[in-house]
Amino acid sequence: MPIDVDSVREDFPILSIKNDGKPLVYLDSAATSQKPKKVINAVTRLYRKYNANIHRGVYRISELATGEYENSKKSVAKFVNAAGMEEIVYTRNATEAINIAALSWGEQNIARGDRILITEMEHHSNIIPWQMLAARKGAYLDYVKIDRDSYTLDYASLEEGLAKSPKLVSVTHASNVLGTINDVKSIARKAHEAGAKMLLDAAQSVPHMPVDFRDIDTDFAAFSGHKMLAPSGIGVLYAKRGLLDQMQPVLGGGDMIKTVDYQEFSSNDLPWKFEAGTPNIEGAIGLGAAVKYLKKLGMENVREHEKALTRYALDKLSGIKNVSVFGPEDVEMRAGVVPFEIDGVHAHDIATIFDSEGVAIRAGHHCAMPLVTQVLKRTSLSRMSFYVYNKEEEVDKAVGAVTKVKNKFMIE
Amino acid sequence: MDIYAEEIISHYEHPHNRGKLATANAEFHDYNPVCGDDITMFLDVKDGIIKDAKFDGAGCAISIGAASMLTDLIKGKSVKDVEKMGVHTVVDMLGIDPGPARLKCATLSLKAAQKALVSYSRTVT
Ligand SMILES: Cc1ncc(COP(=O)(O)O)c(C=O)c1O
């Protein structure tokens, strides 16, 4: 069933605000998503009705809060088809999830001379933790190249990387700059054949399309709640149970222990072993509500909606003189992300003029400097990105803003 | 408000004083990681006066426009005057308030000029 965008928009209070009389056209959901009433209400309901710490109180509202926190984990586990909530560790965001994998599994399993394979299209959050680990251990960080014409991974370069027997392959499911969707199921299979573990950066896929971690057969995965209608400050590290069992906790403190004496502790059961201290309870409950909302829309429908908008935007933009668009032409291989440039105009000037039209887009290196500066050879790019609440009229407004930019800068 | 006044766009498209300055005895390279604006200021300072000023680099219309206007503005001014310049100077010079999101772009060249003067005065004293 296609998404009824007008009724979806009713669910997002922020979409009715105006700036200088102009309605908000929010085209920056790849940076963070807006929040539906269901999520906002789930968070305020906690504060109003049953706020308490979890896993400690024996009184009624603490039991309620604990129950809702765990329900959130159970629904997230189902949403990505994990084997159970034991495999879902709550973190602050995708970045923290990848760092925990590097600090725990990486610290235990990467040694001097080992290799880690990532790609040229990674977000900094899937680059820096591995640079830091490689520097600590004396390991090597290798990159799978991007094919400069198709903006997809160069699978021959992947084979070359795998031939060096990396211990870990860490790759993004969908690029936040180009939108490219990688064939991560086949990458996981090849990684395993080469004896490597696989980490999936799912920050741009889980919010936007059906994702099944067990079908992909990834060993680890990371994503953020704030990009999928939930509050910020809640994210997920997924890992196969067998790995989590072997991994040492990174942070110590309350909640992650079973018993403590003067000199030693024993770790708590999964997934609590990795969650030291009072967690982001409201964030988790908000994430539970967000997953419920997305499930009701249906992730296939979410994906179809964004595909149609992306096709529409690509067609509109590609007809405009002195405007170039980057990323795969085929929307089957592309998430709802459209980076573009206008000849002779800096991305930040474009974004500022868009803003004066009420259109919010992103400009900059998009936290992917190797991709933007080395592969695309740009200092910055403008980017529109879409979600469930965007509609064609908003793309039209963005196209109108392009004309405005060109007029200002006297470009044909 | 429209921060893209025609004068700024015209300075962006035809910047004044762009390029390296052979006679420079003070220079500073600065970078704005938010926008990727990249500007080097070259100053020729003599007897406490800015004899000549040029800039080189790449960036958005606000940063390049401001650098172009600033190099015009500070030529002939004393080092002390330039040291005293601040956000208000840039706002007056541009004729617009760039707003919080773009202030860094607008002030990048002034900051670079002032940092160039700091390192210059260290070498002369
Ligand atoms: C592909 C990708 N990975 C990771 C992240 C990091 O997400 P967060 O900042 O929520 O940790 C982002 C956010 O932009 C992203 O787009």
Image: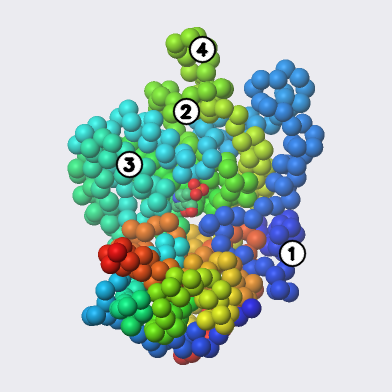
Residue type at the position of mark 2: Leu
Left or right position of A372 against B98: left
C-alpha separation, residue under disc 1 versus residue under disc 3? 44 Å
Q: Secondary structure at mark 3?
A: helix
Question: Label 1 belongs to which residue?
Answer: A16
Pointers 1 and 3 in contact (CB under 8 A)?
A: no
Residue drawn at x 71%, y 59% is A14
- Please tell me the numbered disc located at residue A251: 2
Of callouts 3 and 2, which one flags the residue occurring earlier in the amino acid sequence? 3
Does residue A164 lie above or below A154 as drawn? above
- Please tell me the numbered disc located at residue A132: 3
Left or right position of B16 against A141: right
Of callouts 1 and 3, which one flags the residue occurring earlier in the amino acid sequence? 1
* Spot occupied by residue B27 in the image (x, y as percentages of width and height): 30, 71
- Please tell me the numbered disc located at residue A260: 4
Residue drawn at x 63%, y 46% is A231
Does residue A348 lie above or below A199 as drawn? below
User: Which is nearer the eye, B57 or A274?
Assistant: B57
Of callouts 4 and 1, which one flags the residue occurring earlier in the amino acid sequence? 1
Neighbourhood count class around disc 4 (C-alpha, 10 Å): few under 14, some 14–19, many 20 upward: few
